[in-house]
Image (cartoon, rainbow, N blue to C red):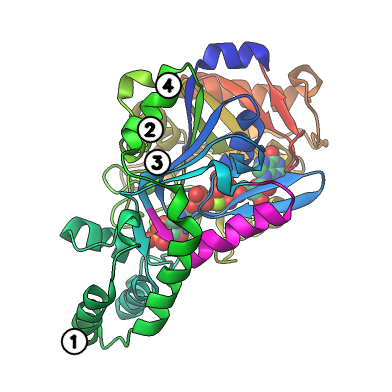
Amino acid sequence: MQKLLSSLGSVTAVIGAQWGDEGKGKATDILGEHYDVIARACGGANAGHTVIVAGKKHVFHLLPAGSLHAGKPVILGSGMVIHLPTLLEEIKTVEDAGIPLMNRLFISGAAHVICEYHKQVDGALEDRRGKSGIGTTRRGIGPAYMDKAERIGIRMEQITQDLRPRIEERAKTLKAWLGITVDIEKELKEIAIAKDALRSCIVSEMPMFLHDFLSKGKTMLLEGAQASLLDIDHGTYPYVTSSSTTVAGALQGLGLPPRVLTSSIGVTKAYCTRVGAGTFLTEDLTERGSRLRERGGEYGATTGRPRRCGWLHLPELKYSAILNGFTCLNMTKLDVLDQEEEIPVGIGVTSSGTATFKNLQGWKQSTVGITDFRKLPTAAQDYVRFIEEEVGVPVRLIGTGPGREEMIIRN
Ligand code: GDP
Ligand code: IMO
Ligand code: MG
């Protein structure tokens, strides 16, 4: 671990290299122990990051999974969209687990609030799109960023103000536009509860606040949410989320100058999954795909939806690596492939738009819990080597199970 850490340096971003749910939470939980400050930059409770510590499952939607490390400052950045009751619930879960959080939680005043009406709008727009829907999480993400871009959003720094006139105005507009009835009293009540609970956590100038940590020599781990192929600019538009999910997006969302970043880790499964609609050239609709789903527990942590399952696609992984400039990769869930005779890997696309595959040899042997690369079956080692050579980025971490200890750190 020490060798890995010294090569990563003082500010590291952990970023999804596929369509989400790669295991970013587990990576930041493991690495978080070795960094001084843990931060999330963008997105909202569309994220679901699962961590398993001593057999106990923790699911995070807004807080970074690294929050489990007592005493470390936790940052929610300006690029985030925050549903207040979800945040309060999550804070309570962490504190109930005996880990104090309130005195070390810092929320950017520039982050936006997700109201119940954003969720209503998300649902109404998805319903209206019908079969051609995006398959959003219906957590109000898109509508909250719409309000932000329209410059009518409510920022965290404003929750102490009297918001009744603004919400009444919004309710009128939404009624006329989508026939939605906004429960104004409920909205105001939720904000009032959050105002009392969170007032002391709100930071007015997050870039200055973070600069202060860095100037004192503190190290920082940025936990990405969503993933590169869901990026609003660089992903598979329109089947994307509404935020910037790349390394650059994480820096922008926090207000960190790019030159402070020393490394970035791209997290990819040993295969591939996607939730919601959109292209997925290596999707496997046969029983092999179902086996990946069952073995990998591929059901959304946020919505419970079954994830679409398939194989790695090298052109996409290379795209992600180039887009983000990954220092190294964390390949997760290698153990899920343990029963495969052969493992297809997408290597290209035909003129008619279908993926071409290369079949790699499987290992038909358990890799669960292995922590030494040399102890992996030869075919599993070859699989990892093939991927890193093709992508041109070394695989330095390899997941062999959901637990905190089930990770190979490779020098
Ligand atoms: P995130 O959104 O990127 O943080 O990923 P999620 O937490 O949504 O999904 C990853 C799932 O895979 C979680 O249920 C993790 O507990 C689990 N997981 C992570 N790494 C591994 C691994 O190496 N092996 C197995 N079997 N499960 C893993
Ligand atoms: P984590 O951080 C997987 C997907 C949704 C949908 C699209 C748009 O756990 O990896 P949105 O609600 O954001 O407007 O939905 O993006 N999506 C995710 N898929 N993991 C996520 O987060 C996701 N966040 C959004 O399924 O296809
Ligand atoms: Mg997830």
Where residue 333 sits: x, y (%)? 67, 40
**Which residue has dot 3 on it?**
228
**Which residue has dot 1 on it?**
176
Q: Is residue 369 left or right of residue 269?
A: right
Mark 4–mark 3 Cα distance, whole angstroms, equals 26 Å
Instruction: Decide whether residue 93 is among the magenta residues.
Output: yes
Q: Give the mark nearer the N terminus: 4 vs 3.
A: 4
Q: Residues within 10 Å of mark 1 (few under 14, many from 20)?
A: few
**Which residue has dot 2 on it?**
209
Q: Which residues are magenta?
A: 81-100
Q: Give the mark nearer the N terminus: 1 vs 3.
A: 1
Closer mark to the observer between disc 1 and disc 3: 1
Is the CB of mark 3 within 8 Å of ligand 2?
Answer: no
**Which residue has dot 4 on it?**
214
Q: Mark 4 and 3 residues: CB-CB less than 8 Å, in contact?
A: no
Is the magenta region chiefly helix, strand or loop?
helix
